[in-house]
Image (cartoon, rainbow, N blue to C red):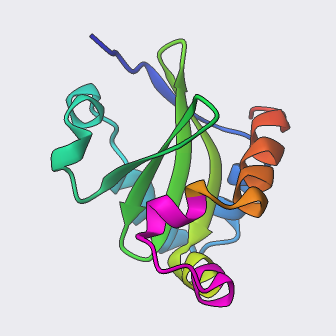
Amino acid sequence: MLSVSQVVFNEISAAEMSALPTLTQLDLLDEFQVDPTDLEAIEKSDSYGIIERDGKRLYRYRAKDMRLYFQVSDGDVVVHRVLHKNTLQDFLYRSKLPLAEDEAVSRSKVFWELIEEGENARRV
């Protein structure tokens, strides 16, 4: 059984959060309560999604207009990126991919470069 102890932001995701208006940050943090049962029953969730590539699993949490991309590592939720949905919609429009959001970004090299940049950033 999966257990989650804390949410950790890296330098990049922390900067993305801090760029948001204060009330948006508070709402997002209040809403982003990762429950292990949510991740175990992800197929039934509208808020969560899974993005996989080359055996790497990344979770997506959808909160209103924001998307948080994270991994669970040693019981911690490590947030790699915090992106506005319009960022992704613009990407999907420009790439003209007729796929669902999670499937489209899972196929994007640029998206995975963003995630790897977040993974390699110092945790704060």
Q: Residue at x 43, y 19 (%)?
A: 5
Q: Position of residue 81 (x, y in %)?
A: 65, 53
Between 94 and 34, the one lying in front of the other is 94
Q: Residue at x 65, y 80 (%)?
A: 91
Q: Residue at x 38, y 62 (%)?
A: 62
Q: Position of residue 115 (x, y in %)?
A: 72, 48
Q: How many marks?
A: 0
Compared across the picture, whether 74 is left or right of 10 comes to left
The magenta span reads 91-105
Compared across the picture, whether 61 is left or right of 46 comes to right
Q: Where is 36 relative to 95, above or below? A: above
Q: Residue at x 58, y 62 (%)?
A: 105
- Quadrant location of the N terminus in the rendered image: top left
Compared across the picture, whether 106 is left or right of 50 comes to right
* Magenta-drawn stretch contains 102: yes
Q: Position of residue 18 (x, y in %)?
A: 68, 63
- Quadrant location of the C terminus in the rendered image: top right
Q: Where is 3 relative to 85, above or below? A: above
